[in-house]
Structure formats: C-alpha cells, structure tokens
Amino acid sequence: KKYVYNFSEGNKDMKSLLGGKGANLGEMKGLGISVPPGFTITTESCNSYYENGERIKPEILKQINEQLQILEENIGKKLGSIDNPLLVSVRSGAVFSMPGMMDTILNLGLNDETTIALAKKNNNYRFAYDSYRRFIQMFSDVVMDVEKYKFEEVLTRVKNANGYEQDSELNEKDLFNIVEEFKAIYKKEVGREFPMSVKEQLMLAIEAVFRSWNNNRAKVYRRLHNISDKLGTAVNIQAMVFGNMGDNCGTGVSFSRNPVTGEDELFGEYLINAQGEDVVAGIRTPKNISVLKDDMPHLYKEFVEISKKLEQHYKDMQDIEFTIEDGRLYILQTRNAKRTPNAVVEVAVSLAEEGVISKEEVILRVGTEEINKLLHATFEEKSLKEAKQLTQGLAASPGAAVGGIYFTAQEAVEAAKTKPVILVREETSPEDIEGMISSEAIVTLRGGMTSHAAVVARGMGKCCVCGCQNMIINYAEKTLKIAGVTLHEGDIISVDGSSGKVYLGEVDKVDAKFSNRFNKLLGWADGIRELKVLANADNETDAKVAFEFGAEGIGLCRTEHMFFEEDRISLVRKMILASDTNERLRFLDRLQPIQSEDFYKIFKEAQGKSVNIRLLDPPLHEFLPKDKNTVKLIAEEIGISVNQLEAKIASIAEFNPMMGHRGCRLGITYPEIYLMQAKAISSAAIRARKEGIEVNVEIMIPLVGLEKELAVLREQIVELVEKEIQLYNADFKYKVGTMIEIPRACLIADKIAEHADFFSFGTNDLTQLTFGYSRDDAEKFIDIYKKKNILESDPFVHLDDSGVLELMKLAVEKAKTTKSGIKLGICGEHGGDERSILLCSKIGLGYVSCSPYRVIIARIAAAKAAI
Ligand code: ADP
Ligand code: MG
Ligand code: MG
C-alpha cells in the first residue's frame, strides 16, 4: 500500500488522503507554481499509527526513507550533512483546514554541527543560529510539550538587556548564546539532551504531528465545525526555504480578496527577514501587502499574478502563505479562504458576475448559518454618537456585540453561562478557542488582520477587533486601563467589529441591511427554488417583517398569542372560568371583535397572500392566573370567593397538559370557542373585502387524530362562514384544513384528507409525540444522547430523517390518493432549518413556513433543495 506521496504525485482531489495542505501543494506544483519540493505522509498513515498502538509501521517508515532520499537527490542536500545540510519543515495537514489547531515544526535537521555547516554554506552565522533557536523552541513545544513561554522569557530578557525592540535585531552572538540556553531549558524540562540525531528528530516530529490530531484544541475545533474525529491528519515533509536570511528575504500571508468585505483587492501582511508564523504571532507589526509593491516591485507583481491564477483555478478566493528567499518567491500553502458571512456573499456573487462560477454554485456556497449571521444587528447611529469611544483597533470581523469583559478563556466560558461576555486579551492563541466560542466578541491588544483572533473569529462569524494598542491589561488584577478609564472584570463594553471601535457601556443595536449583491443572490435563489416560503406570524408586526423578508404568505398565525395581551387576558380568563355556556358566550362575544380586528390587520398586511389561522390550540389552564394577587383580583371581578376560584383552577389543571384537553378537543367540547374565532375571521375578511383588499384565508384545526374530529368541526365552521358570506353578500377565498401533528393522523391521512383542503405538518408536536419526548423536558437527556452518539442530532432542531419523516411521507402519499392537489406544507421550527427543508422538498411538500427572521434562510435553503 502506498502511504507516502511525492508532492508531484498529488492533486487537489486527493484531500482525504493527503490532507488539504498536501493536496494543494501537489496541485500548485502541477500548475507550475514555485513550491519547495517535498512529500506527504497520508492520513491513512495517521490512522494506522493510532491503530498500531501509536507506532509507525515499518512499511510506512520504509516509504518515508525512500521519499526522503528522492528529496535529497532532487535538491542536492542531505539531512544531517555537515557539508550541505538539508532542512525540512514537518507540517500537519488535515482534510479540512483547522487554522492554528495543529502543529508544524520548521528548520528540522539542525544540530550543533549542521548549524555550523549551514552558517558556512551561506556565510551567515546569524541566520543559522536564528534558525536553530527557532527549531529548538518549536521542537520542544510540539514534540515534548515544553511551554513556549519558557523560551520567550529568554528572548525577552536578551532583547531588554540590549535595548532591542524586535527579534530581528538579535545578532549572531546573542543567538548563539540563546541556543545554548534553549538547549539547557530542553534538558531541564525533558530530562535528556536535545537530540542531535536528525533522523530521530524527524521521526519524533512526525509522530508528534500525528498526536497533535488529538490535542484538546483540535478536538474542540472539530466538534464546533462538525468534523469527524476519524479523518486523521497527513504530515508534509518539505524542504525549507528561508525568509530569515536577510533583508531580501521575508515571509507573509495574503488573501486574494478582502476576507472582511469581499472586495477584489489583495489583503495581507508580510515581514522582512522573518520566518514562518512571525506574521501571525503578532511579535512584530507586519507591513501591509501593498507596501511590497515598493519594497520588491517585481515580486509583488509576481504574487498578484499567482494569486489571480490560483483564484481562477480553484474558482474561489484563496488564502496564500508565501516566503521570499534571496529575492525569490515561494508559495507554501493555498486554501479556500475563511471569510466573513458578508464576504461569502460578495465573493460568490462577484465570481458569478465574472463568469467563474454559476448561479447554482453561488447558492450552494452560501451556508445558511452564515447568512443568519449576516442578518444580525449593527449599532444604532445616534446611540453610537453618544457613547464614549474607548479605542479604535482593526475591524477584523464585523458585527455588533455588547457584553461584560473577561480576561481569560475559562472565565469567559464560566460567565457566558449567565450573560453575554466579551473576551479581552493581549492576543489569543488556539488554547483560547472555547472562550472565543462562548463570547459575543473578541478584543485584542496585539495582532493584525491575519492574527489568530481575527482568522478564527471570522470563521465563526463572530465580532472581533484586533490591535487595540492603547489597552493596558492587568491579568492579575483583572483590570483593563483604556482611554483614561479603568474597567474591571464584568464591566460592560460595546464592540463594533465593522469599524474597529470599542465603546464604554451598552450601545443600542439595529437590524442589518442587505447589500446589492445579497439581493441579487436572493433573486437567483427565488428563481431556482420550487418550495414556497411562508412565515409564522401571530400579529401584524410580525407579518410586516415576514413580508419584508420575502415571505409569500403566512403559514401559521397562532391565535392564542393574541389572547395573552394585557387588555384581553382578563376577558379570556373569565371566558374560561365561566360556569356555563351562556356565561362563556357573553365573554366570547366581547372577545370576538378584538380578534376580528387582529385578523383584519393581518389581512391588510397580506394583501391577498394566503393567511393560515390556527384555531385555539393550547390547554386552557395556560391562560389561568398563577400568582395569588391575580387570583384574588379575578375572584372579585367574577364575584366568587378565592377558594372557589382556586378550586375551579385546580379542576382545569392537568397531569399531562401537552397530551390533554387542547387543540381540536377544545373545539369539540366547547364549540362556541371555535365558532367565535371563525366568526372573527369572517367578519375581518368581509371588512377587508369592502375596502378592496384581497383575502385568502385558511382556517386550520389543530391536533386532529380522528377523522370525525375534523369532519364535525369543519361542518360547523363552513356552515357559519357560508352564512356570514350570504348575509353580507361577501366573497372571500377560504379553506379549511388541519395540522398533521399526531402520529395517528399520519396513519389515516387518506381519511382525514377527505375533510381537509390542506395539511400543515406541525413537526414540533409530531416529533414530540413520535419520539414520546416532551419538548419542554427533553433537553436534559438529548444532550447526553448526542454525546453518547445515540442521537446524531436534536430531533427538535433537525427533522428526524427516518421516523418522523417516514410518517410524513406516508401521510403525503395517503393524502394524495384522496386529493391529488391537496396543499401540503410544514410549519414549526423545522421550517427554517436547512437540513429539514431539504427533506421536506424530498417528500413533496409545497411550502415551508418559518419564523420571519428565518425566511431569507429558508429561501436559500429551498433553492439548494431544487439544485
Ligand atoms: P499551519 O497549518 O498552522 O498554517 P504550516 O504548515 O502552514 O502551519 O506552517 C506555518 C508556516 O511555516 C508557513 O506559513 C510558512 O511560513 C512556514 N513554513 C512551513 N514550511 C516551510 C518551508 N518548507 N519553508 C519555509 N517556511 C515554511
Ligand atoms: Mg500554524
Ligand atoms: Mg499554514
């Protein structure tokens, strides 16, 4: 079996075997781009390493040695040679990029002797010892888990003693001494000498990269991004090129477009005379990539060309790592760039405009959860002007966040359980990942647009401001001194990731606006999709928002929510507590015009779009007073004693209300309630028609499980509505149908369909009743089920694609045998979830209905379902 591939044997389609980095290095070689030679040890080797008790099989070792030899011959240098030593980097490379999560070692192959050889060969002792000290530090960290700061302390001390500001000022003597100290630290921490055998260095490094697959931060990252633990990482062994040999050398990172806004311009940073991750680490302040135009004009031009070429080739914006050695440009990595949700849209749509990708491809590229973030708020202008600005950093990742400040990842995680938090740090590192996840925003003192904090935050769509240089953080005292104020842990700040400004206290937020390209994308989605997208809206305000987001109708209007409003709840309570039908009718008569007014307003918003009104659904006792004072008040109003009232309330209470006296059962036992609602609907429709407003109303009866329930209720309702229509000589379109949310209803859907003009799957209740999980209590065990892999996902979030879906499928088939053209759709939370929407389309539903803020997402998801 082949476990090791030369770069020249790889290409971009071999990601699962070679990892993203290795596959793309191979691809770039094939494109004729200058990439230092090397080879990739496959992800299968990593899995074999684990299966084999954390040891590399001899077969793999043999192939590594063969490839090493080829590399040595190819480049004319030898690992460990004291004439012309080969140095390599050992680079991790997972299938999906996990920036900064795993480990890389540079300059491997240096020991006391080869360092001298390297110095002589290049006539540059400073460079050789700079490389050596970097190697010792990285090797100790990655392979032996010696903490980085132990080495950083030495560097800082030497720099301070000599009055240097930057690492690049260290001279050869300094570096020679530093190497000696580093080796001593290694010996002290590890209990052995630093390994002088280069082969041993190489093997230990390869194993360490394999092991880094399972370090804690990598695991957390995988969980966050739903990446399987089984994929394993590849290891790339690559000849070193040196950005730290002098002033005609350097290293940098650049995006082919702006990853914040999506604009078509290079966006990156570089450092002269530096190596590897110096740019990202925030040790020195890097230069903007545009400065390279003046520093090294022909290299800048070359880089621009490569960047365009890679973009065209990969048909996407790239994130490119490069190094300049002695005036020659090398590309060390390219990958599809992480970007803000805003840039996702801008880049995808502009690529389509440029003819690089199709409209369908654009739709497939935008993740609905990213879009969701795009819809998030920004700060309100006026409130912003009044706020005290604390600092202006780099606008690393847009968004508006308000929260209490915390200075460590752990404290942020803890505090975030009860309130919004903002993580404030000098800089972030991969260990902070959990803290970043829990925070609303991240603010750092150091680091640029490509720093760890910036890249990771953009990937998460999280607000981030970097490089706020006027901050003084005191970790010990947990204080932040800034702009003349001292803030303590928990104090509130507001962070504007779009401007890079940070404000004291809480600034008000406003909803997001859509860019032209975003609207264009939505237009494309609408052209492609077949599912209609409706919204759940209980009042005119929600309806208005829903229509602004492009809802084609109201798929669910829950009438009970109107009952809870201040001025009517007392009427509702008295209606429920009425001692006989007559008394109940009296209160219903008073409620009717109020409901009618509500419906009229919604019809007015809808302007002829369909409005689906669900008749009263929840168990009655939900409306009853819970606190003593209210009970007393109501007792007085009705004119009975508190005791009598309490007894009455107790008699209505149920052991299992979700499965109790609710939905159409109320309609059957108290026909007058549903009739009042039907009358309110009719009179609202008649009023609207008089004003020339089109009305297209659907009356929905909830919780039907028996054919008869629907038959009886339908007859009563139709009779009433027809009478009203005749009486007022009105004409409005109405349908009567049902919610399908009881498993039994699915099983007899053909019979139920005889009395229904439409079915709307109420998948919240259907899931609850199919699983036998109470929606309100299931959280406790669903989380554990997920962790133990008993459930793949929460069935209340993503529609259960076997059980519940099977019932729905059956219901659809059966319903169609009775009425081939019956209107079918879904309302409830699943209607706004991409995965569930795909399933709904698969079983032949005609529409989805979701909350107004999910409408945009549903429009895009529905388009995906049609592609
Ligand atoms: P990561 O996956 O964390 O980005 P990389 O393997 O890309 O880690 O390595 C980080 C950096 O190390 C690269 O961006 C590059 O600057 C430097 N590097 C890696 N390999 C080489 C090499 N062969 N020559 C010079 N620099 C290298
Ligand atoms: Mg890295
Ligand atoms: Mg990299």
Image (cartoon, grey):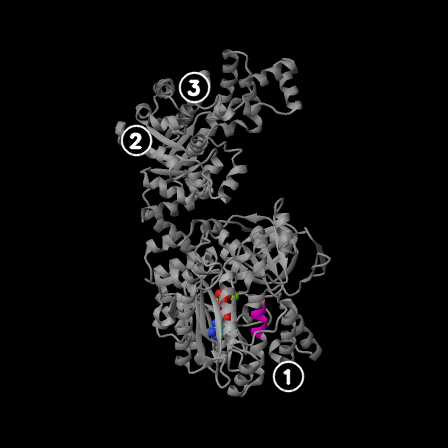
Q: What element carries label 3?
A: helix
Q: Mark 2 to mark 1: distance in Å? A: 85 Å
**Where does the magenta region start and end?**
134-140
Image location (x, y in percent) of residue 777: 53, 33
Q: Name the residue under label 2.
A: 822
In the figure, residue 517 lies in which quadrant?
bottom left
Judge depth for marks 2 and 1 and give the one in front: 1
- Residue 24 seen anywhere in this rendered image of the structure: yes
- Give the x, y percent position of residue 623: 55, 24
- 162 sits to left or right of 311: right
Q: Nearer the viewer, residue 116 or 557?
A: 116
How crowded is the residue under tag 3: few (<14 C-alpha within 10 Å), some, or many (20+)?
many
Amino acid residing under circle 1: Lys
Residue 12 higher or lower than 667, as above or below: below
In primary-sequence order, the first of circles 2 and 3 is 3
Label 3 sits on residue: 675
